Amino acid sequence: METTMDTIKQGTDALFILLGAIMVLAMHAGFAFLELGTVRRKNQVNALVKIMVDFSVSTIAYFFVGYAVAYGIDFFSGANTLAQKNGYELVKFFFLLTFAAAIPAIVSGGIAERARFGPQLLATAVIVAVVYPLFEGIVWGGRFGVQGWINGLTGADFHDFAGSVVVHAVGGWIALAAVLLLGPRSNRYRKDGAVSAHPPSSIPFLALGAWVLTVGWFGFNVMSAQTIDKISGLVAVNSLMAMAGGTLVATLLGRNDPGFVHNGPLAGLVAVCAGSDVMHPLGALVVGGVAGAIFVSLFTLTQNRWKIDDVLGVWPLHGLCGAWGGIAAGIFGATALGGLGGVAFSAQLIGTLLGVGWALAGGFVVYGAIRMFTPLRLTQEQEFAGADLSIHKIGATPEREASW
């Protein structure tokens, strides 16, 4: 009986995390359509192609290098070994790969409309093989002694249940480095100080991308438990409350702008990832609302006043809201505010700052090194024609174009 129950448990765990992997895999369609709807029409094909190919490059990089860097586990053994426990370790790799591949998907939105395809894929390979797994291994793999050091200083480990910092802040701050090295799109900021608006090409596609991401996020967060016995309805409801808080605040501060409305829930979900397993739902609502405010205010500042041409606003959305989420877990996860406890504000602050510093440095090193050998961005003529025709030799509506 005990053997039978163990077998059922192993199979259930494998199925549970497989379903999570599939849900997070579907989120990459959300990344694609969010970018497709935001960029101009002449760059829509490129938006779709980048996410698909980036995911494939990420798979190879993470399978052969990244997963071993993060967890000290490789897959260079016989299939009979890999199939043990219903292949749970393989499915766990699949699940965590979808997180790793989110990094280049985040970066893609920031550098859209002017990045060359080849250099971006090279950067993806290095980031997913080395830069991201090193920090992932520190936080989730317990490697390199950093968690022990933080615990010795603060009395608690750095807590990031589903990746506010490990995934989102790291992706957002890498993207900031890439955006700064690339420079703004042509004619985005004129010499007379005027800002040229580049409105979204399709609000329906933007909304579709946001909805796909929002739905998939419940696999991203809830199934970060990784085994069925650790599943928590608290995580699901906290994610829901943060999503609602982010949406409503972004709607209010963004004055009903659909771009802010549909990025609001994503801001809330980014922020709640870290502490979704320890917060009270009311705390999650506040965390999401603050994230919505951060996104709207910082997107406006970066685009108009600071003149940082981050096309999808991935630095404020993922980088800043992710950092807020890491710190917020130490505030709203405390028992004094209705949380479960086991977290410390100082540990969260240290871990978040380490993640931000590592990502920013890694972004400058990777993209800076690539730029030393090959240009990062399209030529002015290619950018004017659009990435679709310049890189892929076809537009989003080829039949219509041919008829002209």
Image (cartoon, rainbow, N blue to C red):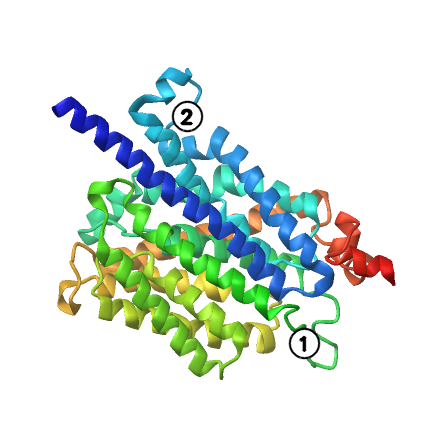
Count every numbered label the image shows and give the total: 2
Please name the residue shown 17% across and 24% down the image. Answer: 4
Q: Position of residue 395 (x, y in %)?
A: 76, 56
Against 25, residue 177 (above or below) is: below
Q: Is residue 335 visible?
A: yes
Q: Which residue is identified by label 2? A: 74
Lateral position of residue 35 relative to residue 322, left or right: right
Against 107, residue 38 (above or below) is: below
Q: Name the residue furthest left.
A: 1
Q: Amino acid at mark 1?
A: Ala
Assess disc 1: are there few (<14), some (14-19) or many (≥20) residues with their C-alpha within 10 Å of its C-alpha.
Answer: few
Please name the residue shown 27% across and 51% down the image. Answer: 158
Q: Position of residue 223 (x, y in %)?
A: 32, 47
Numbered circle sitting on residue 260 = none
Q: Amino acid at mark 2?
A: Asp
Lateral position of residue 267 relative to residue 109, left or right: left
Lateral position of residue 45 relative to residue 224, left or right: right
- Quarter holding residue 149: top left
The N terminus, quarter of image: top left
Q: Which residue is identified by label 1? A: 197
Which comes before the other along the chain, label 2 or label 1?
2
* Local SS, label 1: loop
* Local SS, label 2: loop
9 or 273: nearer the viewer: 9
Could you give the CA–CA distance between mark 2 and mark 1, rounded to whole angstroms?
Answer: 48 Å
Q: Position of residue 207 (x, y in %)?
A: 53, 66
